[in-house]
Image: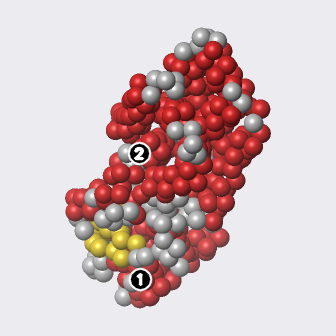
């Protein structure tokens, strides 16, 4: 009997073209629109404020006194014994790039130790930590003078919740490192050293001319930025975020159709005929629970699959993603039961219309479907992250960022607790008004 009710409800939804368009087509369209228009503004502001970052300078000064560089420069001549001026490319980055008027209006940087920087990053007080390793200056100099095949490494650790800011900082660092051997900084630094050493000027000039010509004509990048997220997490883009955001919002719409179908059954006396056939209210409700679970799970799978095909999005661990889909579907199915019982309990009140027009937009805003809850006051964040759609969204985002499933247990438990509350309310209403049910 339960299976029969489950199949009946599923077929009802499949035949309802309007409902299918709303719960499948609308979230896909809104995902594209929001992801393309405001997806980059993940912090909920139309204007990007100053981006706080930390610079960790672990470098030692570089010098032409390095034996390998002297050997290359002199090409067999006697080594240079006179001390050379220290070269610090990190200082050039700070003074020539970050102190630039335009950049300074966008980037707010501090030079800190690695421990201080990571504490601020862990506390979400800065967007990124850029670390220049100890050998950076000497490696850059070797790459310039000798066309060294060794890649010069810069590390960037970032807050995965700030996608656009991370892209700006990453682009700034890569622009500096990729062009370092091709711009005026190269010439100014080396030529200044060359001018103080007349005996080797000719040899150095010929070597540098050849090296610089190769640098300008070569597409090979001597420098690269190693980009790491906080605690190894992956940063997500607007399309990823809004796919999850729209999915959790429209699964609420799916739950609301349970109340709409109950209202239709009451108007057409279908519910009375079902009860007359000796089907208990529990058979009906369990069948509705299973049908809503199957439909919600299918809805999530379809939406995420379409986004994967259209935008080549990586959703992280597939099994973890499917688990979150299943848990979310259980919560939605419980909500569908609650709405159904409310509709039967108070048939004169248009529960479905109130839920669709008022409660769902409010819950979507509170749960982060439109703007990240990180921009909201802390108490609102706490509430938004623990309601059914907000907890589901946090779990989906966590999977996309690569958070281990064990660390998502809080969001999973929150979704299931929401489901338990919905079922308890439903059972209370059924026992309170047995004559209706």
x and y percent of residue 293 in the render?
56, 28
Discs 2/1, front? 2
Q: Quadrant of the N terminus?
A: top right
Q: What residue is disc 1 on?
A: 104
- Decide if residue 142 is on the left or right side of residue 268: left
Q: Secondary structure at mark 1?
A: helix
Does residue 239 sit above or below 419 in this rendering?
A: below
User: Of the numbered discs in the image, which one, if any, rests on residue 297?
Assistant: none
- Residue 380 drawn at (x, y percent): 35, 57
Q: Residue 393 in the image: x percent, y percent? A: 48, 46
Residue 263 versus residue 61 in the image, above or below: above
Which residue does the image show at 69% across and 27% down from the upper left?
Answer: 269
Can the viewer see residue 429? yes
Judging depth in this view, the residue of 46 and 197 nearest the camera is 46
Mark 1 Cα-neighbour bin, 10 Å: few <14, some 14–19, many ≥20: some
Residue 181 visible? The answer is no
Cα separation, mark 2 vs mark 1, equals 40 Å
Front in this rendered view, residue 302 or 228: 302
Q: Give the residue at x 52% y 66%.
A: 41
Tell me the SS state at disc 2.
Answer: loop
Q: Earlier in the sequence, mark 2 or mark 1?
A: 1
Q: Is residue 94 left or right of residue 328?
A: left
- The one nearer the camera, 42 or 90, is 42
Q: Please give the name of the residue rendered at 63% of the width and 53% of the height, measured from the top-left corner.
A: 31
| Closer-to-camera residue (40/331) | 331
Q: Is residue 281 above or below residue 139?
A: above
Residue displayed at 57% across by 61% down:
39
Q: Position of residue 330 (x, y in %)?
A: 49, 30
Q: Which residue has dot 2 on it?
A: 387
């Amino acid at each position: 009997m339960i299976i029969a009710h489950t199949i009946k409800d599923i077929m009802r939804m499949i035949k309802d073209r309007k409902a299918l368009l709303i719960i499948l087509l609308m979230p896909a369209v809104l995902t594209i629109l929001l992801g393309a228009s405001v997806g980059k503004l993940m912090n909920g502001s139309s204007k990007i404020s100053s981006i706080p970052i930390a610079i960790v300078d672990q470098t030692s000064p570089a010098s032409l006194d390095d034996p390998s560089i002297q050997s290359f420069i002199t090409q067999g001549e006697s080594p240079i014994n006179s001390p050379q001026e220290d070269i610090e490319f990190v200082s050039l980055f700070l003074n020539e790039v970050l102190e630039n008027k335009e950049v300074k209006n966008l980037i707010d940087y501090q030079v800190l130790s690695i421990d201080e920087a990571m504490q601020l990053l862990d506390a979400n007080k800065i967007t990124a930590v850029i670390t220049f390793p100890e050998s950076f200056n000497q490696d850059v100099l070797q790459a310039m003078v000798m066309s060294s095949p060794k890649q010069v490494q810069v590390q960037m650790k970032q807050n995965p919740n700030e996608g656009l800011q991370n892209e700006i900082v990453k682009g700034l660092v890569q622009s500096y490192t990729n062009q370092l051997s091709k711009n005026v900084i190269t010439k100014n630094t080396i030529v200044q050293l060359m001018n103080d050493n007349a005996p080797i000027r000719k040899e150095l000039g010929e070597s540098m001319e050849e090296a610089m010509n190769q640098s300008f004509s070569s597409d090979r990048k001597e420098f690269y930025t190693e980009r790491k997220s906080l605690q190894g997490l992956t940063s997500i883009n607007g399309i990823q975020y809004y796919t999850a955001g729209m999915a959790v919002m429209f699964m609420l719409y799916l739950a609301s159709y349970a109340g709409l179908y109950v209202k239709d059954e009451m108007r057409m006396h279908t519910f009375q005929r079902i009860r007359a056939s000796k089907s208990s209210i529990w058979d009906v409700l369990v069948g509705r629970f299973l049908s809503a679970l199957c439909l919600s799970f299918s809805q999530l799978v379809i939406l995420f699959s379409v986004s994967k095909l259209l935008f080549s999005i990586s959703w992280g661990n597939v099994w973890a993603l499917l688990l979150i889909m299943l848990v979310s579907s259980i919560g939605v199915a419980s909500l569908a039961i609650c709405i159904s019982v409310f509709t039967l309990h108070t048939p004169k009140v248009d529960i479905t219309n109130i839920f669709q027009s008022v409660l769902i937009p409010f819950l979507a805003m509170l749960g982060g479907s439109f703007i990240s809850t990180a921009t909201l006051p802390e108490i609102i964040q706490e509430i938004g992250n623990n309601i059914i759609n907000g907890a589901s969204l946090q779990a989906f985002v966590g999977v996309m960022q690569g958070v281990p499933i064990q660390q998502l247990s809080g969001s999973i438990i929150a979704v299931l607790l929401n489901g338990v509350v919905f079922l308890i309310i439903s059972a209370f209403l059924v026992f309170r008004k047995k004559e209706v049910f």
